[in-house]
Amino acid sequence: MAQRKKTTKPDDVLIDISEVSGSAENFFEQYKKQILIVGGALAVLIGGWVAYKFAYVGPRQKEALEQMAQAEHQFQRDSFALALANPGGGFPGFADIVKKYGGTDAGNAALYYAGVSNLNMGNFDAAISYLEDFSPAGTLLPAMKSGALGDAYAEKGDLAKALSLYKKAANEDDNEVITPYYLKKVALLSNKQGDKDSAKEAWEKIKNEFPKSNEAREADKYITSLN
């Protein structure tokens, strides 16, 4: 994973954003189909919308996916600036896909990609704007959205907002990987803000409910330090 320059002071660094974004990419690749389902159920409600979808949105969705392939390739290579604006070969970046293919599931997915790309580039306000417009499906993708937003707000120094978003990410669903991942962030940030009880509670939840997670290996060390 490419390393991005920190904008915070060394003693204020709470989260390794490059690690976070890498995790988000892996989750996205595994659960991409969930994103592309967004809005599909509405098509059966209104006959006119059904006709619109199959005559216009359907072909545009296929076109958008084809146009987005090169940007996805650059994203997977951690070439976030290229993925966002100029992936090469005459193909559009995620920013242009969002504008051109708004209303399609692929355009919605591009919002997430664009948000994470901006997050890695240090463009935190832009990251927040894209991520807030992203409409996630299921339970895992909402957690990813909240977690990425938390990272952006943490980098901007709004730690209260970041903590709220990390808690939301951790409580979306009991996922064996992402839940302890964000519980750790809750613990670290709570401790940073002087709330040792909440930090200890988060570590104990990791230890007791997700004992096989990577984060559980660190739990005893942190719990001891909080006693």
Image: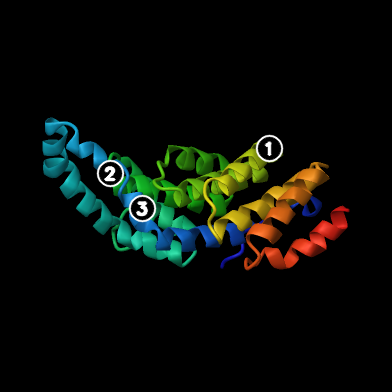
C-alpha gap between disc 2 and disc 3: 18 Å
Is residue 184 among the parts visible in the rendering?
yes
Labelled pair 3, 1 in contact (Cβ < 8 Å): no
Q: Quick one: label 3 or label 1, which is nearer the N terminus?
A: 3
Q: Residue 82 at what x, y percent from top left?
A: 43, 58
Q: Earlier in the sequence, mark 2 or mark 3?
A: 3
Residue 20 circle label: none
Name the secondary structure under disc 3.
helix
Residue in the picture at 62% in, 45% down: 166
Residue 126, percent from left and from top: 51, 41
Q: Mark 1 highlights which residue?
A: 158
Measure the alpha-carbon separation of dots 3 and 1: 30 Å
Identify the mark at residue 101; answer none if there is no mark: 2
Q: Residue at x 74, y 49 (%)?
A: 201
Q: Is residue 42 left or right of residue 144?
A: left
Q: Around disc 3, counting alpha carbons within 10 Å, would you say few (fewer than 14), some (14 to 19), or many (20 or more)? A: some
Residue at 55 percent of width and 54 percent of height = 120
Task: Name the amino acid, label 3.
Answer: Gln
Q: Nearer the viewer, mark 3 or mark 1?
A: 3
SS assignment at label 1: loop
Q: Which mark is residue 34?
A: 3
The image quadrant where one finds the N terminus is bottom right
Q: Nearer the viewer, mark 2 or mark 3?
A: 3
Q: Position of residue 216 (x, y in %)?
A: 69, 64
Direction from residue 5 to residue 128 in the image, left or right: left
211 sits to left or right of 89: right
Q: Position of residue 199 (x, y in %)?
A: 76, 48
Q: What's the amino acid at mark 2?
A: Tyr
**Residue at 12%, 32% in the rendered image:** 47
